[in-house]
Image (tube, rainbow, N blue to C red):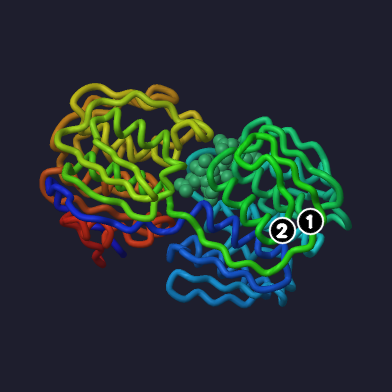
Amino acid sequence: MSVIRVRGLQNLHGEIRIQGSKNAVLPLMAAALLHSGIIVITNVPRIQDVFCMLGILESLGCHCRFEGHELMMDTRSLLLSRVPDVHGKQMRSSVILLGPLLGRLHEAETCYPGGCSIGRRPVDLHLSALEKMGAEVWAKEDQIRVSAKALHGSDIYLSFPSVGATENILMAATASSGITRIHGAAREPEIEILCRFLNAMGAAIDGIGSDLLTIHGGKPFHDVVFAVPGDRIVAGTYLGALMAAGGNIRLLGVPTEHMGGTLAAVRGMGCEVKAQHGDICACMKERPRPVSLCTGPYPEFSTDLQSVMLAAASVAQGRSRIRENVFEERFATAQELQKMGAHIIIKGKTALVTGTYPLAGGVVQARDLRGGAALVVAGLAAEGESRIYGYSYISRGYEDISRDLAAVGADLSLEED
Ligand code: EPZ
């Protein structure tokens, strides 16, 4: 079993090239199924969720080649419309195959999606929208099946700006007749990237970046080569590591235009940050100042960095408040941080943190992807050795967190226990 061993209290110095974005590349791989041809995506991160999505595409009949960070998908031989449970259960993104498969093969089937257990994570918004666009939806126990001879444009009103539901509707709408408008669409950068990818493939989407997306369906698709931007959550994670460890680092290949909320929060905690031309230079001279933040749909502070901020706040000089407004169960990591000496009290949706320094090295267990990364961040501010189990969660979204942080002087390694 893999375990990350961290010896804390080392300052960080140096630079890290940020991997391609997990939450951007997964919908692009799904969207490729809309077109019968050759799609090439570059700067693809070598993470478990990408390999899982590759497994799904190949099980459906596609031929893929993933060399270095370049992914070629030949979707001309797409044949099957049923996502194998073995893959579907591994990640949330299996659900966003419904839209493209419906658009290309007029049917799709998958088990209820897996992914981090951070809340109930229903798919009602996905299914009700597809139904409104003309699909027949069948959902019982653990299976979801959709079919439609022809999808048609529709006005879809989302009661919550769901990222995945917006992605599914966007992809289905490009293969529908007529015009689809998504009112209350998610505005996460990953939605903008998906819209740009679909338009590069031949779609006609207006309103990109806004919460009203208009899709003129039925346009012919063509082959495309597309580059995935850097991962804003991985970049934010490493800024959290810097706040815990101190020092100065440079992050290369970062989508700084999509990190406004993150940069404001870390600056508020005393981190000096200069963002220019896709790079971030950051310096942390002393313990973080306390923080008060709420997570929410973009452009509010990202829920995916909540656990990392919890770890940084655990060593801040004072009391912090962190409120989780997106997922109802995303504080599981607090229990593990408490084993390292963190003073965290959870009251409903809010974590009250009284900073203490240093933390104490301990044996802890990742409970989800971003929580696992947060434990690594905490280990950097702990006296002695920490051993973080549950690497299988972390490797879903981080290409090699040990490699990246060791490259800037952290004393940590990935070992077999
Ligand atoms: C995406 O998940 C991301 N995953 C998540 O990142 C991210 O936390 C989330 O968006 C919010 O930004 C990927 O892109 C692969 P949602 P998704 O649909 O699409 C509720 C990570 O760590 N909801 O916007 O599942 C839902 O329960 C992962 O990289 C419904 O009620 O997020 C949640 O409370 C974790 N009904 C809220 O909306 C629905 O039909 C946000 O979910 C769909 C969602």
In the rendered picture of this protein, how many numbered marks are placed on residues? Answer: 2
Q: Amino acid at mark 1?
A: Ala
Residue 84's quadrant in the figure? bottom right
Provide residue 121's location: percent of width, then percent of height: 58, 41
Q: Is residue 128 above or below residue 142?
A: above
* Along the viewing direction, whichever of 199 and 373 lies nearer the viewer: 199
Side of 100 relative to 333 (left or right): right
* Residue 121 in sight here: no
Q: Which mark is residue 38?
A: none
Q: Pointer 1: residues within 10 angstroms few (<14), some, or many (20+)?
A: many
Q: Quadrant of the C terminus?
A: bottom left
Q: Secondary structure at mark 2?
A: helix
Q: Which mark is residue 100?
A: 2
Q: Which residue is mark 1?
A: 175
Provide residue 138's location: percent of width, then percent of height: 78, 50
Whole-angstrom CA distance, mark 2 to mark 1, is 8 Å
Queried on whether the Cβ of the residue with tag 2 lies below 8 angstroms from ligand 1, the answer reads: no
